[in-house]
Amino acid sequence: MTNLTVQQVIEKGGKEWVKGEISRVYMSQDLFNEATGQQVSLNEKKWKFYVDANTNQFYRTNGKKPVLVK
């Protein structure tokens, strides 16, 4: 379940990244927790948090396969 839309994540400081048809909004762990209602506590230097702007699905990744957050 998500608490914030892609646009709200951007308004709260998320950073848009677009390459071809891929569109993501990267965010801090705190914003990720607010957006997803989760209480993730990971090393932000190793983990990235983003929302796929095309599907409105939230992910976390450590440079390997992204993990979909439900």
Image (spheres, grey):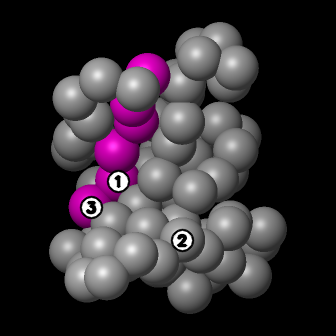
Q: Is residue 3 left or right of residue 30?
A: left
Examine the rendering and report whether any part of residue 4 can be seen: no
What kind of secondary structure does the magenta stretch mostly adopt? strand
Residue bearing mark 1:
58
Residue 59 shown in magenta: yes
Disc 1 residue type (three-letter): Phe
At x 35% / y 53%, what residue is drawn?
Answer: 58
At x 65% / y 37%, what residue is drawn?
Answer: 29
Checking the image for residue 57, the label placed there is: 3
Q: Secondary structure at mark 2?
A: strand
Nearest-to-viewer mark from 1 and 2: 2
Instruction: Give the Cα separation between the discs numbered 3 and 1.
Output: 4 Å
Disc 2 residue type (three-letter): Trp
Checking the image for residue 33, the label placed there is: none
Rendered location of residue 11, percent (x, y)? 74, 82
Which numbered disc, 2 or 3, marks the residue that appears first in the sequence? 2
Q: Quadrant of the C terminus?
A: top left
Residue bearing mark 2:
17
Specify start and end residues of the magenta stretch as a single range. Answer: 57-62
Up the image or down, 29 lies above or below 10; here it is: above
Disc 3 residue type (three-letter): Gln
Total numbered labels? 3
Residue 2 shown in magenta: no
Nearest-to-viewer mark from 2 and 3: 2
Could you say which is closer to the camera, residue 23 or residue 53?
A: 23
